Image (cartoon, coloured by chain):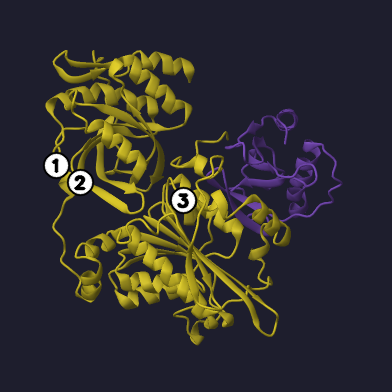
Chain colours: A purple, B yellow
């Protein structure tokens, strides 16, 4: 990914979600962006929380999306179908969630689609 | 931070003209131990500098990442920064060796920029080393200030002996941290203990008498002092646990989240029919190890890597043996081991069958140590990971309906035995370095087990770039 595209993604996410940090540890790795103040709908806590997005093969593929390992719902359980992933030297929570991916290149829209997962499970 | 840093740097331990002594903070509520772990090459560089007495004493700073744990922090060597002659004043202000406050400031700024801490290292050229009154007089102003600036990271000073060391470590102005040992990780693991920690041995274990004759009388104590983690306790890992217990390893961390099922009986050493659908694989591991020797300290972790529980347990280990199925898991474990400077022994088998007969049975045993090629340098490539990601998306193998890979218990056993031989060699060094950083290729059909060439470390390897980084910096929250 070109540096212009990296900067565009980080800037767009920062504007939409309050803050965004390029946390990529090595130029060999795909863009890693931390969203430190992502708002989750109730009853998910804590909110705001941290999320990590990894932009591998973007825009051909949707980014990977992880949340802080401490996030739980009403019954103190993580989102359904969870798994742990090791990125940036710490454990993040991943979960499976299918949504249509039209291959468009708006980074804000795709993160918003990931976050709808928390609305779906709440209901 | 920059303003605070500048203000505090003006006060920082100028070894030439010490500043006023800062007020100590309350001591930590419980004793806290500090160990140091670093690669053999880095240790050789630092010793070459501080043990060269042609101009008098020399010293330098070791830039370190930190592995924080319950009651024990491990400082992980990342970079050696010798104090240049241009910054040194000898025998001035009543001190054997002094250096400029400007150099201290540069070192601190380097540490801040890398979210790291520093250790001062020097030597008096003697075994059973003891800090001199000159050392002590410099220490309080220097590390009292350093430790406040680097808070919450510990900092301090190491005095090297011959195969032992003295240490004085600080946290937030307090000097009551206890130094334990230096662990030097290269082709073998070399331990330099704190002088006062040289305790009498509890005596040789009779059950290991024949092994001790084979690999040396020191092996009993060294093996007893070592903790090995085994990730994955099925076809490969159960063999490994059993053999490590027989070998006399003192501590085992057994990591797996699964329960014995009927198919386990075909490959899981120690599993019984009465375990089916009831017994966690960690319990089988405990039964295997404690059946050999009840004094082995077995820590079961009923979770998968990288659960926080598994990470916490792994940080207390000396060696990691990975017996996992996926390249994604290998990538993550390799990344972890590089960050914490832990030797990694990886085994795996890939079996292909036509449905009626065995077509291929390819296995590997890889020993990855700091400063040598890691799994991401050559084996777990982007292309391999990408292919696996397509076939098995993240989370796939947590699906209980996912098909299991074909396995043959006896072939797993061959690789597991070689993994245990490599663990022994990392501790005892009997191969002369011919296992570390090496790759054994196994053909389960013919029984051929051959060493294969490993490429040089990849300069742009993303895992090697994090070597010694330890715990992540606090990401924004």
Question: In which quarter of the view is residue B56 placed?
Answer: top left
Q: Is residue B282 visible?
A: no
Query: In which quadrant of the rendered image does the N terminus of chain A lie?
Result: top right
Both marks 1 and 2 on one chain: yes
Both marks 3 and 2 on one chain: yes
Q: Residues within 10 Å of mark 2 (few under 14, many from 20)?
A: some
Q: Which residue is mark 2?
A: B163
Query: How far, Cα to Cα, is label 3 from label 1?
Result: 32 Å
Indicate which disc, 3 or 2, sits on the residue closer to the N terminus. 2
Name the chain letter of the residue that bears numbered label 3.
Answer: B
- Rendered view: B89 above or below B26: above
Q: Residues within 10 Å of mark 3 (few under 14, many from 20)?
A: many
Indicate which disc, 3 or 1, sits on the residue closer to the N terminus. 1
Name the chain letter of the residue that bears numbered label 2.
Answer: B
Q: Nearer the viewer, residue B94 or B72?
A: B94
Could you tell me which secondary element the residue under label 3 belongs to?
A: helix
How far across and down, in percent of the image, does residue B282 sit?
46, 70
Relative horizontal placement of residue B307, taking residue B47 as reference (left or right):
right
Relative horizontal placement of residue B76, taking residue A45 as reference (left or right):
left
Tag 1 and tag 2, C-beta contact below 8 Å: yes
Question: In which quarter of the view is residue B206 placed?
Answer: bottom left
How far across and down, in percent of the image, does residue B450 sit?
48, 67
Nearer to us: label 3 or label 1: 1
Numbered label attached to residue B200 = none
Q: Which residue is mark 1?
A: B127
Q: Which residue is mark 3?
A: B337
Question: In which quarter of the view is residue A27 placed?
Answer: top right
How far across and down, in percent of the image, does residue B154 sit?
34, 34
Relative horizontal placement of residue B277, taking residue B432 as reference (left or right):
right
Indicate which disc, 1 or 2, sits on the residue closer to the N terminus. 1
Residue at x 46%, y 15% (from the top left corner): B3
Name the chain letter of the residue that bears numbered label 1.
Answer: B
């Amino acid at each position: 990914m070109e540096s212009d595209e990296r900067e565009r993604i980080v800037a767009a996410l920062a504007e939409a979600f309050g803050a965004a940090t390029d946390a990529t540890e090595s130029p060999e790795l795909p863009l890693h962006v931390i969203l430190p103040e992502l708002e989750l709908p109730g009853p998910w806590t804590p909110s705001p929380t941290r999320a990590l997005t990894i932009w591998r093969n973007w825009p051909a593929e949707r980014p990977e999306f992880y949340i802080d390992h401490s996030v739980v719902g009403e019954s103190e359980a993580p989102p359904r179908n969870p798994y742990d992933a090791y990125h940036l030297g710490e454990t993040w929570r991943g979960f499976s969630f299918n949504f249509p991916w039209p291959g468009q290149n708006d980074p804000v829209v795709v993160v918003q689609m990931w976050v709808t997962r928390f609305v779906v499970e709440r209901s | 931070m920059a303003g605070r840093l500048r203000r505090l740097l003006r006060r920082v331990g100028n070894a030439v003209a010490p500043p006023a002594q800062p007020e100590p903070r309350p001591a930590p509520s419980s004793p806290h131990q500090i160990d140091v772990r670093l690669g053999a090459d880095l240790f050789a560089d630092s010793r070459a500098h501080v043990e060269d007495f042609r101009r008098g004493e020399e010293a330098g700073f070791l830039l370190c990442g930190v592995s924080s744990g319950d009651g024990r922090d491990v400082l992980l060597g990342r970079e050696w920064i010798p104090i240049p002659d241009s910054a040194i004043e000898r025998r001035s202000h009543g001190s054997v060796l002094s250096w400029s406050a400007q150099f201290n400031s540069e070192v601190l700024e380097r540490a801040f920029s890398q979210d790291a801490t520093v250790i001062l290292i020097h030597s008096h050229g003697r075994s059973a080393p003891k800090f001199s009154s000159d050392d002590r007089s410099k220490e309080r102003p220097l590390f009292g200030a350093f430790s406040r600036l680097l808070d919450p990271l510990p900092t301090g000073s190491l005095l090297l002996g011959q195969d032992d060391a003295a240490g004085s470590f600080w946290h937030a102005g307090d000097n009551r941290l206890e130094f334990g040992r230096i662990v030097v990780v290269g082709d073998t693991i070399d331990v330099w203990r704190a002088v006062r920690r040289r305790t009498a041995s509890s005596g040789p274990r009779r059950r290991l008498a024949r092994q001790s004759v084979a690999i040396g009388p020191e092996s009993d104590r060294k093996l007893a002092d070592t903790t090995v983690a085994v990730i994955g306790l099925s076809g490969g890992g159960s063999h490994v646990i059993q053999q490590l217990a027989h070998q006399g390893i003192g501590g085992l961390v057994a990591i797996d989240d699964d329960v014995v099922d009927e198919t386990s009986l075909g490959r899981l050493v120690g599993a019984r029919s009465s375990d089916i659908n009831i017994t966690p694989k960690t319990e089988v591991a405990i039964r295997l190890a404690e059946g050999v020797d009840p004094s082995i300290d077995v820590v079961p972790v009923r979770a998968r890597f990288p659960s926080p529980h598994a990470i916490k347990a792994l940080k207390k280990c000396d060696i990691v043996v990975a017996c996992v199925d996926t390249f994604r898991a290998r990538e993550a474990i390799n990344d972890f081991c590089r960050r914490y400077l832990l030797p990694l022994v990886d085994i795996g088998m890939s079996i292909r069958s036509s449905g009626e007969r065995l077509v291929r049975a390819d296995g590997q045993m890889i020993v990855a140590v700091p400063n040598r090629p890691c799994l991401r340098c050559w084996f777990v490539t982007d292309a391999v990971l990408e292919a696996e990601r397509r076939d098995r998306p993240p989370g796939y193998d947590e699906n209980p309906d996912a098909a299991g890979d074909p396995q043959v218990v006896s072939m797993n056993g061959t690789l597991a035995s070689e993994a245990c031989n490599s663990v022994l060699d990392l501790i005892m060094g009997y191969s002369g370095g011919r296992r570390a950083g090496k790759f054994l290729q196994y053909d389960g059909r013919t029984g051929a087990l051959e060493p294969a060439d490993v490429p040089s470390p990849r300069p742009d390897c993303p895992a090697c770039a994090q070597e010694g980084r330890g715990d992540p910096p606090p990401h924004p929250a």
